[in-house]
Image (cartoon, rainbow, N blue to C red):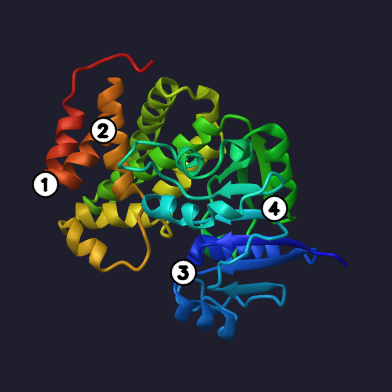
Amino acid sequence: MIKDKIVVVGAGSWGTALALVLASKESNDVYIWEYNKELAEILETERENKKLLPGVKFPDNLHVTNEDKDLLKDAKAVIFSIPSQVLRGVVARFSNQMRSDLLIVNTGKGIEISSGLRLSEVIKDEILGKYHNNIVVLSGPTHAEEVCKGIPTTIVAAGKLEKAKAVQEIFNTEAFRVYVNEDIVGVELGGAVKNCLALGAGISDGLGFGDNTKAALITRGVAEMIRFGEKCGANPTTFYGLTGIGDLIVTCASQHSRNRYVGEKLGKGYTLKEILEGMTMVAEGVPTVKAVYTKAQELNVSMPIVEAVYKVLYEDEKAASMVKELMSRDLKEEF
């Protein structure tokens, strides 16, 4: 049987989980590229990502490598699972291997601080224009810790319809259901903004607030997401789906959420420096809140929750005082 070669760039928890989904299909031959040669060798030898996803063994059709020369040759798709602020450099590394028949999938969630660009736009910056329509974004309410165990999950592939459907076909399994959406702007912004709001949800938890507060934060967060998205050209209905409300709920509520965890620690009085130094994984909301806040200011979009989170992270405002400020804003109609 001739197998489809698929390359996953990035051996973090999400990249590993997606590689496991792909490798669950015997028709695929999956390669994970890890930039650290020593770590790549450990993962390939131990056949398990013991640090990030312990207990989940790699099947025989999943390989880990540090070699990037000609890695994308004959590949059907390349999946980038890279932190948002270093994505540009990694894409540039593989840019000369792009082809017209290669699907280019990004799974990261964020906005590049230096440029204010969405991540699909960052990829476009680093590859030839004739490959731009091959870019698809894969996003939704998903935690690697559950996906790798085959727990039922739904996600969205966004891009040009033909390409999005091709990615849908590649990833879809009995436990990993993929929907398609042509609103790549809305899908990307939903994934970025929800991380900022999850920091706020964590702050609420850290301050000892309850379900009422979190429900209010999620609901008003959706309003901010829609206002911001519309100004950026997104379809507002996208934010009522999996990559808006769905992703926001799971990220604000789950114990797996790195962003909620960072917020909780902030609410308990830890400094951002202390929190980040104690983490092994990236909380994308930390840099993204700076990018979203800056963009919202430029577009004159009201995002009071994001603004409050930004002030706690970057202006050393006390979390409790920011909650008081939010609750004391001018009274207004809900819609």
Helix, strand or loop under label 4: helix
Say what amino acid the circle numbered 3 marks.
Tyr
Q: In this view, does 235 lie to the left or right of 316?
A: right
- Tag shown at residue 224: none
Q: What residue type is labelled 2?
A: Thr
Upstream in sequence: badge 4 or badge 1? 4
Where does residue 270 sit, x and y in percent of width and height?
A: 17, 59
Q: Name the residue under label 1.
A: 316
| Mark with earlier residue (1, 3) | 3
| Residue mark closest to the camera, 2 vs 4 | 2
Where is residue 29, by image quadrant?
bottom right
**Marks 4, 1: nearer the viewer:** 4
Q: What's under tag 1, amino acid-wise? A: Asp
Foreground disc of the pair 3, 4? 3
In the depicted view, which residue is nearer to us: 334 or 291?
291
Q: Callout 1 environment at 10 Å: few (<14), some (14 to 19), or many (20+)?
A: few
Left or right: 183, with 284 as reference point: right
Q: Which quadrant is home to the N terminus? A: bottom right
Q: Which residue is drawn at 31% across and 66% down?
A: 279
Please name the amino acid that badge 4 sits on: Phe
Residue position for label 2: 294
User: Disc 2 on helix, strand or loop?
Assistant: helix
Q: Do the residues labelled 4 and 1 touch (CB within 8 Å)?
A: no
Residue that label 3 marks: 35
Tag 3 and tag 2, C-beta contact below 8 Å = no
